[in-house]
């Protein structure tokens, strides 16, 4: 992280330099640096909540935390920060180490950007769908007055009794 500006004046200089270059990879670096900074704070809140309430990790308790305790704005921001930080980081690693350069590195970089954005869209859709499911469960629990209800699995476990000692036709 030695490349991050340590004061506002340095930030202004590097931002002006980046704007004058109009280089997509430099913009991605700024986004990754910003999301890393954001994740430090939002991730700390998330980890503190998980560590102090480890017994309350389950679908109902998590849904209640997301909806009834108004944590969904934090999780929206955390989802965006983690997703962008991760996929930009993977893209930058591939470019830096030349893992997929092949015969034409410029064409490979264009293809890697497409893969990066496809992964971004996929994981954001998946993340927002998961968050929406937790919000729906939390809203239903709040409407039904069952906030804080513990989850008890209702699936039946099937038992198989093998009476014959031979398995798979082998005696």
Image (cartoon, rainbow, N blue to C red):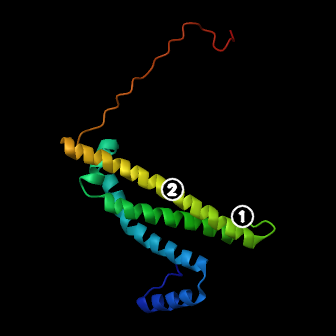
Q: Earlier in the sequence, mark 2 or mark 1?
A: 1
Q: In whole angstroms, how far apart are the C-alphas of marks 2 and 1?
A: 23 Å
The residue beneath circle 2 is 123
Question: Image height check: is 89 above or below 171?
Answer: below
The quarter in which the C terminus is drawn is top right
Q: Quadrant of the rendered structure where residue 90 is?
A: bottom right
Q: Toward the viewer: 122 or 69?
A: 122
**Of all residues shown, which one is farthest toward the top?**
164
In the image, farthest residue toward the right: 103
Give the x, y percent position of residue 44. 36, 63
Q: Is residue 104 above or below residue 59?
A: below
On screen, 81 above or below 139? Answer: below
Q: Tell me what residue is drawn at x 50 percent, y 15 percent.
A: 160
User: Does residue 20 appear anywhere in the picture?
Assistant: yes
Quadrant in which residue 6 is drawn: bottom left
Horizontal relation, residue 138 to residue 102: left or right: left
Q: Please report the residue visible at 34 percent of the width from the left and 53 percent of the height from the top.
A: 50
Q: Identify which residue, 9 or 84, lies in the foreground.
A: 84
Residue 137: which quarter of the image?
top left
Numbered disc total: 2
Q: What kind of element bears circle 1? A: loop
Number of the front mark, 2 or 1: 2
- Neighbourhood count class around disc 1 (C-alpha, 10 Å): few under 14, some 14–19, many 20 upward: few
Whether residue 147 is visible here, answered yes or no, is: no
Left or right side of 169 for 52: left
Q: Residue 110, relative to residue 47: is it above or below?
A: below
Q: At 50% across and 74% down in the image, what residue appears?
A: 31
Residue 20, x across and y down, in percent = 57, 90
- Which mark, residue 65? none
Q: Which mark is residue 99?
A: 1
């Amino acid at each position: 992280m030695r490349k991050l500006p340590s004061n506002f004046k340095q930030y202004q200089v590097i931002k002006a330099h980046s704007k004058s270059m109009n280089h997509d990879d430099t913009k991605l670096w700024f986004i990754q640096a910003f999301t890393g900074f954001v994740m430090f704070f939002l991730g700390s809140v998330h980890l503190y909540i998980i560590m102090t309430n480890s017994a309350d990790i389950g679908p109902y308790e998590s849904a209640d935390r997301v909806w009834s305790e108004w944590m969904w704005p934090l999780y929206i921001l955390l989802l965006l920060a983690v997703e962008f930080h991760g996929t930009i980081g993977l893209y930058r690693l591939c470019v830096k180490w030349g893992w997929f350069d092949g015969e034409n590195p410029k064409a490979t970089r264009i293809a890697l950007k497409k893969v990066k954005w496809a992964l971004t869209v996929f994981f954001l859709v998946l993340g927002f769908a998961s968050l929406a499911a937790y919000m729906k469960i939390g809203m239903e629990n709040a409407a039904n007055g069952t906030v804080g209800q513990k989850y008890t699995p209702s699936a039946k476990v099937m038992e198989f009794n093998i009476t014959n000692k031979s398995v798979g036709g082998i005696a």
